Image (spheres, rainbow, N blue to C red):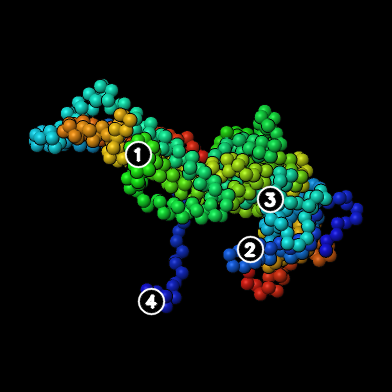
Amino acid sequence: MAEATTRPVAPPAPRPEYVRQEPLNQDFGVVEKPLSLWERLYDNGAFRKTFLLIAIAAIWEIYARHLNNPLLIPTFFETVGAFVAAIESGELPEKAANSIRLLLQGYALGLALALAFTMLAMLTRIGNDLLETLTSMFNPLPSIALLPLALIWFGLGDSSIIFVLVHAVLWAVALNAHSGFRSVSNTLRMVGRNYGLTGARFVLKILIPAAFPSILTGLKIGWAFAWRTLIAAELVFGASSGRGGLGWFIYESKNMLDVPSVFAGLFSVILIGLVVENLIFRNLEIATVRKWGMQS
Amino acid sequence: MNQPSALADEPLLSVSGVTLQYKTKKHLVTATYRVSFDVMPSERYVLLGPSGCGKSTLLKAICGFMQPTEGTIKLRGQPIQKPGSDRVMVFQEFDQLLPWKTVKKNVIFALESSGRLRGQAAEEKAMEVITKVNLAKFADSYPHTLSGGMKQRVAIARALAMEPDILLMDEPFAALDALTRRHMQDELLRLWEETRFTVLFVTHSIPEAVRIGSRILLLSPHPGQVKAELNSDGSDAVDPATGLKLSERIHRMLFADHFAAGGSDHG
């Protein structure tokens, strides 16, 4: 290296130019050829995942049969049987509906409070400090840890669960919405004010849509927290007013040593979680931030 | 400093003795110091100067986003208090378009938010201006699918739809590539020929100022003060007194200032 820097480099010798005279080649081996069926299938993510799921089910079935102890691990087909039976008897759909009803109540209340908090934080400096302090305090606290306290305050009932759900949703949504609002570009704010928007109209027509990617993230995180919290809370007690949810279904089945039903209950929790995350939120995302090119 | 010539009628925009200051975390910055100028109706008035001459800050004050610490800014004789849709700004940044609205909805948004037009009338006006900037085919496209030049054309269309007293442009073509920039300048002049709107245009490019402007205000940096006010016919004509082209005269004035300031700042 040192040598190259000290010694002066001679200019490169002039080289001949090249302009193609003969016509371009016409016959190649392959220009375009359809891929084989296997290549195309392997390229498909859904196919690969379905294949994995079938493989997992097969390993499960083989292992459970080999173990031959339905109290520990029921076979795959026993679980499916219990799932179908619980759906046919109407027990599982009813329990799931109870869970979802509670969840929606808590979620809606949490969103309303989050909106109020964020508005306050956007409008006043002390509100901003309040939100920052509260979120940094409560965000690391798993909301299920508040359940004992909620039981003392609200007794054994829906209101206790709704209280923990609100706690699960509120901070995640408020935190994300607030940071979303604050990162709305100055240009966009000036555009809004230039066209005469002030106060609530400004928030509604500029800030909320502009911060929507963050708000959506908050909604997703809030949902995930709420769903996990709900199932956990129902495990602790669920027979409130005689109607349990999915968590209670799992707990009850375990008490009756009906392990296939425990698996069926877990399966329902997973299924509902997947549907909400991959169907509802995914489509909401496609219809909004993806379409607007705002996906961050 | 710069009194309006006696023969012209009332100035549309009158800036007199304006000092602008803003605070950063650590400093109080004086952006402009006692700047005065008048903009006449249908003029293409250009504010030209190196970065740090306060030209963008001046535009923000005219738009009503900040108040001068000294001096007055008057539009049609009325002092400017707050932002309003009688002065519409076109920004340099592409994100001035609302990404969640299509091209047409962006224009309608401006008309409806300001209460200028509603419903069918707003839609018709939107299509009219979008057609004017040759984007009718893209009326239902979202901004992120458009090129930079197209986005700026939408922003100009949105501003023109408002039929403001004065169109404020803050380096609207600075983020475009050289070819597109040239094309946009021609397009702006063509649009001006059609309706003869009044435009206040901020730039730091001498050729752009010479092409776009009918009158050019030259500002010196740190803080911005008026250095010269020149006329331009767009052809970069030779000044008989000095034998220099307009762009050369401007260049010399800016460079003289550079040396005086120690040449530490590059515009």
Tell me whether marks 3 and 2 sit on the same chain: yes
Disc 2 to disc 1, how far (Cα)? 55 Å
**Viewer-nearest residue: A289 or A254:** A254
Instruction: Give me the residue at 61% from left, 40% from top.
Output: A201
According to the image, label 1 marks what residue? A155
Disc 3 to disc 2, how far (Cα)? 24 Å
Residue B169 disc label: 3
Instruction: Give me the residue at 90% from left, 55% from top.
Output: B6
Tell me whether marks 4 and 3 sit on the same chain: no
Query: Would residue B80 appear left or right of A189 to someone viewing this image?
Result: right
Q: Are marks 4 and 3 in contact (CB under 8 Å)?
A: no
Q: Which type of secondary structure does the marked residue at label 4 adopt? A: helix
Give the class, few, some or many, for how many residues have Cα within 10 Å of label 1's Cα (few <14, many ≥20): some
Tell me whether marks 1 and 3 sit on the same chain: no
Disc 1 to disc 4, how far (Cα)? 81 Å
Q: Nearer the viewer, mark 4 or mark 3?
A: 3
Looking at the rendered structure, the kind of residue marked 4 is Ala
Q: Earlier in the sequence, mark 1 or mark 4?
A: 4
Instruction: Give me the residue at 46% from left, 40% from top.
Output: A111
Looking at the rendered structure, the kind of residue marked 3 is Met
Q: Which type of secondary structure does the marked residue at label 3 adopt? A: strand
Determine whether A8 is above or below B214 in the image: below
Q: Earlier in the sequence, mark 3 or mark 2?
A: 2
